[in-house]
Image: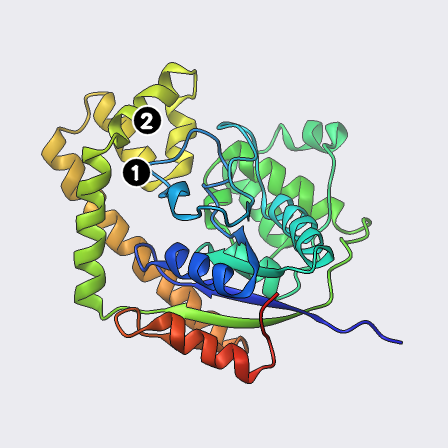
Amino acid sequence: MARMKTPLIVILGPTASGKTRLAVAVARCLGGEIISADSRQVFRGMDVGTGKDLGEYGAVPYHLIDIVDPGEEFSVFDFQKHFIGAFETIRDRGRLPILCGGTGLYLDAALSRYRLVEVPPNPALRSELAALDLPQLQQRLLALRSRQHNTSDLQNRERLLRAIEIAEGQKDTPPLPLPDLEALVFGLRFERSELRRRITERLRQRLEHGLIEEVASLRQQGIADATLEYYGLEYRLVARHLQGLLNRNDLFQKLNSAIHQFAKRQETWFRRMEKQGVVIHWLDPASQPLEALLSIIAGHGIGGP
């Protein structure tokens, strides 16, 4: 007898849309556990800037948060591997998996069934690539992978080398076995002006509640400014502030603008997901989203624990 597909509830949305709060409420109602789809919440010690809000979870179990140290590499493959492990653990406990986050690549890795593979370092290939300059490396990668999801790989030599290494290694390596799941996807979408207000207010709160001190602590632990640049947004600009390159007012203004732009890019990614066939049930965060979500879930025959 064929095994029935395991339901997966997905809650996505741009930054500051209230995803975690809704996911926790759903988990409490339906006996669920939350899997984070946030590319920075995997790192320990990066709490204020990533908005972990661990106090919101209460007794609800969560996964893929605080699992690696800052400075360690964590790729989309690593996310997919950990997602599969968490999904199967939750399923085997008879609980409901709830994927919550706004990192587009991670959501796609779970929903679009990316066939990713684990590729070990290849010293011989690295030696061959050592003589190539950045434009030549970029050309080499694009020849292997014409549709490059993460364009930041094209600007950093070390990440470019690793991307080529992975693209070459994927030719002969079997992909991870993916779980048999059936996703029901929900999105939170505020009216644009309200989302902008929420982003700005949350940024003020984070600056008042230790964001600068958090980045200073990471630097004191030996995390290089170049690494903080890679983590983007809050970590990039606060690091520049701590280097004396931005005053406090410029920090707020530039960071506020950058987060607004980031939210727009997230929304563009979600529209792309829909064009590629992902059905997203959009909820109004200001109008009882939990009740609306539970009603849709009940219509799909998904109940409590």
Residue 70 x, y percent position in the rendering = 48, 28
Closer-to-camera residue (20/150)? 20
Residue 222 in sight in this render: yes
The residue that mark 2 highlights is 215
User: Position of 185 compared to 20: left or right?
Assistant: right
Task: Say what secondary structure mark 1 lies in.
Answer: helix
- Extreme residue in the left direction: 249
- Could you say which quadrant of the image residue 226 lies in? top left
Seen at 21% across and 56% down, the residue is: 198
Residue 10 x, y percent position in the rendering = 52, 65
Closer-to-camera residue (38/163)? 38
Q: Are marks 1 and 2 in contact (CB under 8 Å)?
A: yes
Closer-to-camera residue (29/297)? 29
Quarter holding the N terminus?
A: bottom right
Residue 59 x, y percent position in the rendering = 49, 46
Seen at 61% across and 43% down, the residue is: 163
User: Quick one: label 1 or label 2, which is nearer the N terminus?
Assistant: 2
- Where is 68 relative to 29, above or below? above
- Where is 29 relative to 53, above or below? below
The residue that mark 1 highlights is 234
Task: Say what secondary structure mark 2 lies in.
Answer: helix
Q: CA distance from mark 1 to mark 2?
A: 9 Å
Give amino acid for label 1: Glu
Closer-to-camera residue (87/112)? 87
For disc 1, the neighbor class at 10 Å (few under 14, some 14 to 19, many from 20) is many
Give amino acid for label 2: Val
Residue 75 x, y percent position in the rendering = 58, 43
